[in-house]
Amino acid sequence: MEAYILKVFGRVQRVGFRRYVLDSAQELGLTGYAKNLPDGSIEIFVQGDVEGLSKFLEIIKQPMIPAKIKEIIKEETNPKPEIKEFKIIYGELIEELQEGFGAMQSIFADYWREFRDYRQEFKDYRQEFRDYRQEFRDFRQEFRDYRQEFKDYRQEFKDYREEFRDFVRRTDENFKLILDKYGEISEKLTIILET
């Protein structure tokens, strides 16, 4: 069994870091304690097997937000076999309540910043939606233009049909006229040939 005293500096008080340390140590089967120090750091006494201690040190270097580690000073010490569990050594009730409220305030501030980020993202989406709406309006207008163009083509086609009918009618009349004249010429030729 090995043991260490760790002094952890950074944003570690009033952010739920001791609870994170407690949960991590218990999960790895380590014993010891964590307590706040007046200088804003946290002291951790931890003991257990070498592998568990190594994992513990890696885990606490990357705490949950909003905690942030600046430095960890590690000092080897003698194990204390009388310590059978890992616990948080609490200060006075008022300090602990203040720490709990401080943790909530830190978390709330982080959520507020995140919410503000989402507000900007939402504004961006609104603008993007406006752009899409404008694009859709443009497509609708383009579709109307195509419809109008199609109507114009239909009208042009109707005009061509009418022109073609007129051409057919005139051609019919011309053929009838030719037939009538051919009939007269044929009759006259027949008379001439018979005489």
Image (cartoon, grey):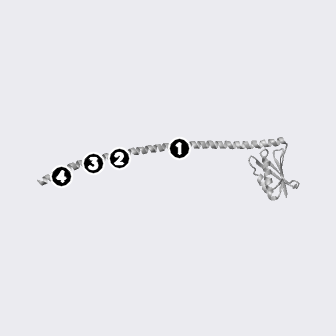
Q: Which residue is mark 2?
A: 161
Q: Which residue is mark 1?
A: 136
Give the residue at x 78% y 56%: 55
Q: Which residue is mark 3?
A: 172
Give the secondary structure at mark 4.
helix
Q: CA distance from mark 1 to mark 2?
A: 37 Å
Q: Earlier in the sequence, mark 4 or mark 1?
A: 1
Give the residue at x 43% y 45%: 150
Question: Which of 8 and 138 lies nearest the eye of the viewer?
Answer: 138
Q: Residue 74: x percent and y percent?
A: 82, 53
Q: CA distance from mark 3 to mark 1?
A: 53 Å
Foreground label between 4 and 1: 4
Q: Earlier in the sequence, mark 3 or mark 1?
A: 1
Foreground label between 3 and 1: 3
Tell which residue pokes out farthest to the left in this image.
Answer: 195
Would residue 179 be seen by someone viewing this image from the given angle? yes
Q: Which residue is mark 4?
A: 186
In the image, taking residue 124 as reference, residue 70 lies left or right, namely: right
Q: Residue 112: x percent and y percent?
A: 70, 42
Give the secondary structure at mark 3.
helix
Q: CA distance from mark 4 to mark 3?
A: 20 Å
